[in-house]
Image (tube, grey):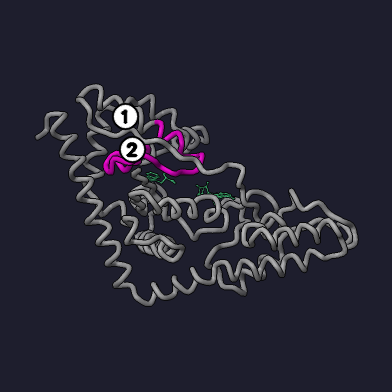
Amino acid sequence: MRVLSGIQPTGRPHWGNYFGAIRQYIDLQHGNEAYYFVADLHALTTVRDPERLRQNVIDAALDLLALGLDPEKAVLFRQSDVPEVSELCWLLMTGTPMGLLERCHAYKDKKEKGLTADAGLFTYPVLMSADILAYDADIVPVGADQVQHIEVCRDLAGSFNHVFGETFVLPKARTLDASAKVPGTDGEKMSKSYNNTIELFEEPKAMRKKIMRIATDARPMEEPKEPEGDHLYQLYSLFVDDERREAMAAMYRRGGFGYGDVKKALADAAESFFAQARAKRAELVADMPRVNAILADGAARARKKAAATLLRAQQNCGLK
Ligand code: ADP
Ligand code: TRP
């Protein structure tokens, strides 16, 4: 199977991003031909500060590599390093009904709020389709919010194939388990928009402070508590093996403990869970030529694949 996904370089990843998305993407590099790119062209629809964009792109690449993306196994590259994708985007655009894009939520939501949208946001799903089709991807792992865009991609690929003959592989979305919602420091879903996140590579001290401030209820210490549904317990469970999780569950059911103890255990578990990735990230930061070489090599491999698809599409529609 050929797997592909794009990661928006819009900020530092938090626990929700890791357990909800990044970890699964990285796991898929095993046993598949995998392509992962940092979607800097898409980020341009929101980030309008050149220095910030450049830094975000590098940060996203560093994060993925530190978390286990193996450049020997998967192809890691910057979206904008493959200009073939933008050319393919135009070919797709000529066959894209306006109505299809008008129904896409990113554009629709903005319009409904009375904000003016630009053509970049409006055609965002077409560029995303080109990203996917350029590499003949079979499987596209994404969050639930992106499934609509994969449907657009299938529509566009299907109608191109219908008009010009077999050209594109129709991809399938692989959605991540929606029930695996990671709670934030207030117990609601962890999200940048709710200001309740804990970042993966936050300084250990700052991370500990945030953990100690996680909201809890005011039940007395001695009262036995049901662990399932308790957000501190849910967070702790992400970082430990079955044995330690069971031990924590038993402590909840027994009662006679303070939430402060759980928070300390959580901070220790999270710190050791990410210790290796943190060290790896520091090592990569100290060797930027290596990181740049990985991205350059990824771009060369990605371009080769995208160029072949683009040529096929150009020939089939009468350009070459
Ligand atoms: P945010 O809500 O912080 O803006 P994004 O929308 O950028 O996060 O999410 C990027 C990816 O991380 C998505 O695939 C999404 O499904 C996943 N994700 C984000 N927050 C969580 C969470 N709290 N639990 C599980 N997955 C999450
Ligand atoms: N739009 C995706 C997001 O916001 C990022 C993305 C761009 C992408 N191109 C892609 C994801 C192609 C999968 C495939 O998360």
- Residue most extreme to the left: 320
Q: Amino acid at mark 2?
A: Ser
Q: Tell me which residue sits at (35%, 53%) in the image.
A: 37
Q: Secondary structure at mark 2?
A: helix
Please provide the residue range marked out in magenta: 124-151
Q: Position of residue 162 (x, y in %)?
A: 25, 22
- Residue pointed to by mark 2: 129
Q: Nearer the viewer, residue 305 or 320?
A: 305
Q: Main secondary structure of the magenta part?
A: helix
- Name the residue that disc number 1 marks: 156
The quadrant of the rendering that contains the C terminus is top left
- Compared with 99, 146 (above or below) is below
Residue 129 sits in quarter: top left
Q: In the image, 170: left or right of 17?
A: left
Query: Mark 1 or mark 2: which comes first in sequence?
Result: 2
Quadrant of ligand 2 in image: top left
What's under tag 1, amino acid-wise? Leu
Classify 56 as above or below 188. Answer: below
Q: How many marks?
A: 2
